[in-house]
Image (tube, rainbow, N blue to C red):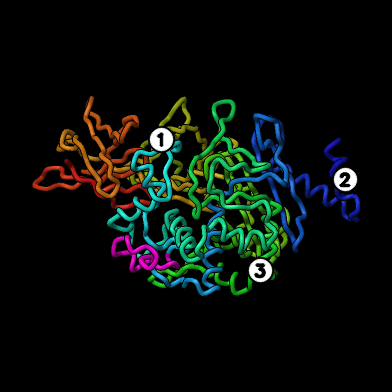
Amino acid sequence: MRTLYLLIIVFAYSASSFGQVKVAVSIDSIFAKWDKPGVPGCTLGIMKDGKLIYARGYGMANLEYGIRNTSNSVFRIGSTSKQFTAACIIRLAEQGKLSLDNTLDKFYPEFPAYAEKITIRHLLNHTSGIRDYLILSYLKGLGDDDYYTDDDVMQWLTHQTELNFQPGEEHLYSNSGYWLLGQIVNKAAGMPMADYAAKEIFKPLGMNNTHFHTDHTQIVKKRASGYEPDGAGYKICMTTLGLIGDGGVFTTVNDLKKWDDAYYKSDVLSRRFWNMMTERGILNNGDTLDYACGLVVSTHKGLKTISHGGAFVGYRTQLLRFPEQHFSVAILTNRADANPSRMAYKVADIFLADKYTDKTEKQPAKKQNEPATKPDVIFTLKQLTGTFSIEPGVDMELKIKNDTLNITQLWNNSSYNVVAKNGNTYQIPGEASISFVFSELKDGIAHVMTIHQNGGKAVCQRKKEVDLSGIDLADYAGNYYSTELDVTYIITLADNSLKLKIRNHERADMNIIDVDQYSSNGTILRFSRQNDKVSGFYLDAGRVKNLGFVKK
């Protein structure tokens, strides 16, 4: 009863207090599992028509000292920072200190010749083709606890002889692009970006608890510590890195409200500024992207949205704006297992349900994920077993365990059972937001598994059997060197199995995908030959493509 009493006090001066209490209860239910001592949680801020209409902390900001999250707690916001890096670039463009059509070589001539074709606009829209430095660090054998500097990252990037693709040809998220934008701000502004952002954006807007964090030893008052699950408890997540541009902002929901206000009316940031910030990227073929300048411009249930999420160490964040409804949701969490984007849309649904124009998106998740009609043939469990690939090297193995279909994600060995819900549609018990739909029965087995989740889908093909009779695994054993990474990979053969070793890390299994093609820990190795002898391989790892290694 105490909670209800407090809520009534909060809304006592409103004639519609009963309705507001119901809304508050609905909001709090979304975060109920975190709203207790002993667990990290989040801070929520809801903005409507220029007012912060709801702000609450859930769970703990610091588990060691028992400090709760509040609306004043300061969080690292990961990639949600990118819009502030973009804002610095746009401000400099307004001041005539750079142009979005300036090319990378203008600022950093030490890059290979491809920099002559990469514009600031490409960097803003993730269409530059530059390989992601965070993936490069992983491929070099560096871990989360390793330390490196801006100079190190610049050296890595200038040593990349190739791009993932030609500038403007594709859209591929790249932290390198926004880190480089931060470096460009340093040069064009004549001062560190942290200082420029404070001078031009944060201080003028009154965002007094917001800054770019360049020194991990800096004391941040009211900081929420980041955590990730560890068995039955949690462990703290920290970083010694001081890199900014792709991330690095610390802020509060109260300060983000001031940033949100500036979108609608500001003496500091002009309408032209925001038009440039929200101008969506265009590929060389004329296709328009959802991505603008550190912002995703999209729709939700028929309404326009402007948003961006973030994830780094133990923090997960989302800032979601519905500009035409003058409504925004900010969720800053200090737990690595959080999904603030999904929670932000749930909050929005409470307030905007009567505004939605796309009625098809309003269907419950269960109906959304199930086929419209019952299939003619219901597949047996045995017809569903096998290995399905989301993409090369990213596989899910399906087996029957205790008369139940079990799925193992081979990239992390996570395993769970699924049960039939309707025809050839399966779900994890108690989890209606994700469904597995099987189709295309050929030769007595299903060849396609479509995963539906939160309105999106991934089509997985049954992994084809590879004829291993003519393959000599010993051909692949040896040392392989990459000049671009300055690292040697060691491939060994033991017990008829190939293993990959990088620096001092444990040896990782290599799984065959096709002839001369293997996967290992989420990377794809495509081997090349000369005179029928293995001479090297090209590596693909998500945001890094076609990285070459030569057999020594």
Q: Is residue 443 left or right of residue 150?
A: left
Q: How many C-alpha atoms fall within 10 Å of the one at disc 3: few (<14), some, or many (≥20)?
A: few
Q: Is residue 369 visible?
A: no
Q: Secondary structure at mark 1?
A: strand
Q: Is residue 30 left or right of residue 185?
A: right
Where does the N terminus fall, quadrant-wise?
A: top right
Name the disc covering residue 398, or none: 1
The percent position of residue 427, horizontal first and vertical second, equals: 53, 40
The percent position of residue 83, horizontal first and vertical second, equals: 56, 59
Residue range corresponding to the magenta coloring: 104-122
Name the disc covering residue 268, or none: 3
The percent position of residue 390, horizontal first and vertical second, equals: 40, 46
Name the disc covering residue 8, or none: 2
Mark whose residue sits in front, 2 or 1:
2
Residue 117 within the magenta-colored segment of the rendering: yes
Instruction: Name the residue nearer the viewer: 107 or 413.
Output: 107
Q: How many C-alpha atoms fall within 10 Å of the one at disc 1: few (<14), some, or many (≥20)?
A: many
Where does the C terminus fall, quadrant-wise?
A: top left
Q: Compare marks 2 and 1 and give the one earlier in the sequence.
A: 2
Q: Compare marks 3 and 2 and give the one earlier in the sequence.
A: 2
